[in-house]
């Protein structure tokens, strides 16, 4: 049974010089617009219970595709079939009236879903608890911060399990604790068989959550298939990976983590006996060690840690994670812990590299915190080997 | 013939669209109206009572001015105040619905752009609000002036007047969204419409050579219908026919134009 079917779907946006031109075009039938194609000939069939990621550069047509599935706008060409109740988190603030209070907006949302007063009150109670918006619910939503807005919108959209959940970058706002809760909620829907369409610039999250990925490029479907394969091709096509652009270097101030979340308290990189931000190493001789300290809400499961080594262009050369390697971390009763990882006889070839550290949930999926460019390493070598890594090898003369 | 039948069928099919939407989203409409009433009167001592008190006090002031201070009585149709108040209250209601309607799509843009909000009910918000505010004043005033037996007729007439406004408010809302000047010009147009309609004067007081102009003014027909319904004044058969044909023409035009512009409204 299909949850979503797109058949040769296209969407063209029309741009008008003045508002009046729209009216004139409708009244006279004479075109007065400049057309921009956002989507073209997209055909996709998504089964019930599938978790599908959508990736692509800015302007590739990801949000347009999600809006068409959500029914917010009609396609210009082709057909969209959606089988089931859709809940969509499209844009921050969409569907909420800024002058109404959070409570009134929720009542309106309940009325839109044809729910009676008792259902509306249940929705309000749920949003208050899940979004932690006690007093704020009685304030106009125009006074909300982006994080509060995200909590209101996410909690309202996920009050009841939808048949199809559409999430467009919704998890990129909101504090760490809420991001964790909303992430858990999405995973809960995944377990209970909801179809999920997830759009994110975080390739890591897409790969962690989704079994299948659609890659859009200039409004056309570039690839559709198993997540790891499509993401690898997508990553290769990028000149500037999104992680480098999106995430600033982490200051890591020593403070208590927010409730329901965790944060990095420190990360130190050693090359042999030296530590610092700019380090020098020798290929095959130096030893790289990364020490990581974190502080987590003790009520949460103990987090996992990952370390990445990236090239100057931001591409991952390699990474290692405690969850992936089956390492169970420990922490003290207040939630602080420490771990280190060592890469002996560093096999990197000459060049400049960066070390990044990630603090993730116990399943290694949700990123609580990250520190990019913890250290920059200049690797030197004695030979003339080319590339980024010297793989273990042996020659056999026959 | 087949083509004519096809177009007639399409024309007729436009009428049930709005009632279906209203019924489906009645809770949303009620929610928007209630919220607006509470917002408009928040922090006042008398709360929502002000919504009805305002037009009621206005009617009282007009009655005091014309009946007590100026003592204007003669209209050829009995007391001037009886004649004037019927037209004035319904004009006031129409004025409020249309002027507010001109900006209703802009006002609620955040609700429907990029979300699944039923746009078609928005033009009904100003009509519903104006009707709720002015209906009690109208019925009570008619009962006060003509006796309790005037209540059912006043109620029925008010409902017809509100229904007649629906396509007009939809059209004004669409125009107001795309042509900002509409919101500036409309209050003047409405005031002008009151002066050229037989509200302050009777049709008989208009020079005979200019009376044909009145027949071009739907507000004049609506007011004449009210005097017939509530006061039992004479009414030519052409008045209800003009009103009915006018509404039957306007409603599909408004519906079709709305449906064509709806995707544009959402994408703007």
Image (cartoon, coloured by chain):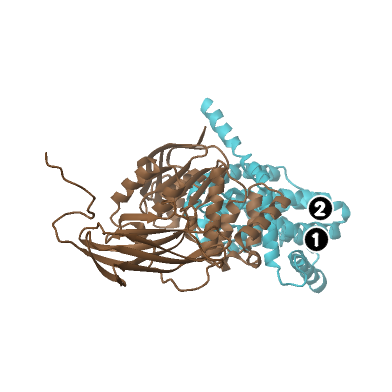
Tell me residue A57's x, y (percent): 35, 52
Residue at 62% from the left image edge and 61% from the top image edge: A102
Cα–Cα gap, marks 2 and 1: 9 Å
Secondary structure beneath label 2: helix
Q: Nearer the viewer, residue A278 or B218?
A: A278
Q: Colour of chain A?
A: brown
Q: Nearer the viewer, residue A195 or B191?
A: A195
Query: Which of the 4 quarters of the picture holds residue A377?
Result: bottom left
Secondary structure beneath label 1: helix
Residue A6, relative to residue A133: is it above or below?
Answer: above
Asked whether residue B196 appears in the rendered view, the answer is: no
Q: Characterize the local packing of mark 2: few (<14), some (14-19) or many (20 or more) Cα atoms within 10 angstroms.
A: some
Q: Nearer the viewer, residue B43 or A14?
A: B43
Instruction: Say whether marks 2 and 1 touch (CB < 8 Å).
Output: yes
Residue A52 located left or right of residue A395: right
Q: Characterize the local packing of mark 1: few (<14), some (14-19) or many (20 or more) Cα atoms within 10 angstroms.
A: many
Q: Earlier in the sequence, mark 2 or mark 1?
A: 1
- Badge 2: chain ID: B
Residue at 54% from the left image edge and 50% from the top image edge: A186
The chain drawn in cyan is: B
Q: Residue tagged by mark 2? A: B231
Asked whether residue B181 appears in the rendered view, the answer is: yes
Q: Residue tagged by mark 1? A: B82
In this figure, what is the number of numbered marks?
A: 2
Tell me residue A212's x, y (percent): 42, 42
């Amino acid at each position: 049974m299909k949850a979503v079917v797109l058949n040769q779907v296209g969407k063209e946006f029309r741009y008008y010089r003045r508002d009046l031109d729209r009216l004139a075009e409708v009244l006279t039938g004479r075109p007065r617009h400049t057309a921009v194609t956002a989507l073209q000939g997209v055909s996709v069939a998504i089964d019930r219970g599938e978790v599908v990621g959508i990736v692509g550069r800015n302007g590739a047509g990801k949000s347009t595709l999600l809006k068409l599935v959500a029914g917010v706008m009609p396609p210009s060409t082709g057909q969209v079939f959606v089988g089931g109740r859709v809940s969509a988190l499209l844009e921050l603030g969409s569907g909420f009236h800024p002058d109404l209070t959070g409570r009134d907006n929720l009542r309106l949302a309940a009325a839109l879903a044809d729910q009676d007063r008792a259902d509306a009150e249940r929705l309000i109670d749920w949003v208050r608890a899940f979004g932690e918006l006690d007093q704020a619910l009685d304030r106009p939503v125009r006074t909300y911060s982006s994080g509060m807005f995200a909590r209101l919108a996410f909690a309202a959209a996920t009050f009841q399990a939808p048949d199809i959940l559409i999430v467009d970058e919704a998890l990129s706002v909101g504090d760490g604790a809420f991001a964790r809760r909303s992430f858990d909620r999405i995973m809960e829907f995944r377990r209970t068989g909801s179809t999920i369409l997830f759009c994110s610039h975080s390739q890591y999250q897409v790969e962690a959550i989704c079994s299948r990925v659609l890659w859009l490029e200039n409004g056309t479907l570039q690839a559709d298939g198993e997540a790891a394969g499509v993401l690898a091709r997508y990553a290769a096509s990028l000149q500037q990976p999104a992680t480098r652009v999106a995430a600033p270097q982490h200051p890591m101030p020593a403070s208590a983590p927010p409730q329901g979340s965790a944060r990095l308290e420190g990360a130190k990189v050693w090359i042999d006996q030296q530590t610092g931000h700019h380090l020098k190493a020798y290929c095959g001789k130096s030893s790289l060690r990364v020490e990581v300290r974190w502080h987590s809400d003790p009520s949460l499961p103990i987090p996992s840690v990952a370390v990445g080594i990236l090239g100057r262009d931001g591409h991952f050369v390699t990474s290692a994670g405690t969850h992936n390697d089956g390492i169970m971390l420990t922490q003290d009763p207040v939630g602080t812990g420490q771990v280190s990882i060592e890469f002996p006889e560093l096999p990197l070839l000459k060049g400049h590299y960066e070390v990044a550290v990630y603090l993730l949930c116990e399943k290694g999926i949700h990123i609580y915190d990250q520190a990019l460019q913890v250290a920059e390493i200049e690797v030197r070598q004695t030979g003339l080997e080319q590339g980024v890594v010297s793989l273990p090898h042996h020659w056999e003369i026959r | 013939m087949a083509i004519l039948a096809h177009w007639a069928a399409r024309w007729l099919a436009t009428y049930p669209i709005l009632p279906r939407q209203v019924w489906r989203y009645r809770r949303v409409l009620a929610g928007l109206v209630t919220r607006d009433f509470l917002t408009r009167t928040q922090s006042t001592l008398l709360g929502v009572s002000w919504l009805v008190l305002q037009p009621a006090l206005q009617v009282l002031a007009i009655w005091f001015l014309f009946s007590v201070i100026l003592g204007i009585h003669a209209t050829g149709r009995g007391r001037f105040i009886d004649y004037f108040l019927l037209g004035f209250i319904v004009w006031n209601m129409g004025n409020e619905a249309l002027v507010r309607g001109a900006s209703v799509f802009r006002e609620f843009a955040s609700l429907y752009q990029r979300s699944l909000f039923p746009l078609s009910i928005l033009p009904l918000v100003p009509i519903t609000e104006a009707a709720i505010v002015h209906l009690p004043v109208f019925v009570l005033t008619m009962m006060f002036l003509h006796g309790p037996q005037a209540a059912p007729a006043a109620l029925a007439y008010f409902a017809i007047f509100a229904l007649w406004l629906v396509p007009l408010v939809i059209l004004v809302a669409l125009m107001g969204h795309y042509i900002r000047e509409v919101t500036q010009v409309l209050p003047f147009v409405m005031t002008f419409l009151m002066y050229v309609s037989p509200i302050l004067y009777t049709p008989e007081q208009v020079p005979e050579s200019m009376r044909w102009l009145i027949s071009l003014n739907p507000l004049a027909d609506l007011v004449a219908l009210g005097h017939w319904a509530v006061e039992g004044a004479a009414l030519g058969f052409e008045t209800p026919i003009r009103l009915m044909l006018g509404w039957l023409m306007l409603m599909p035009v408004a519906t079709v134009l709305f449906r064509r512009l709806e995707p544009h409204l959402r994408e703007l």
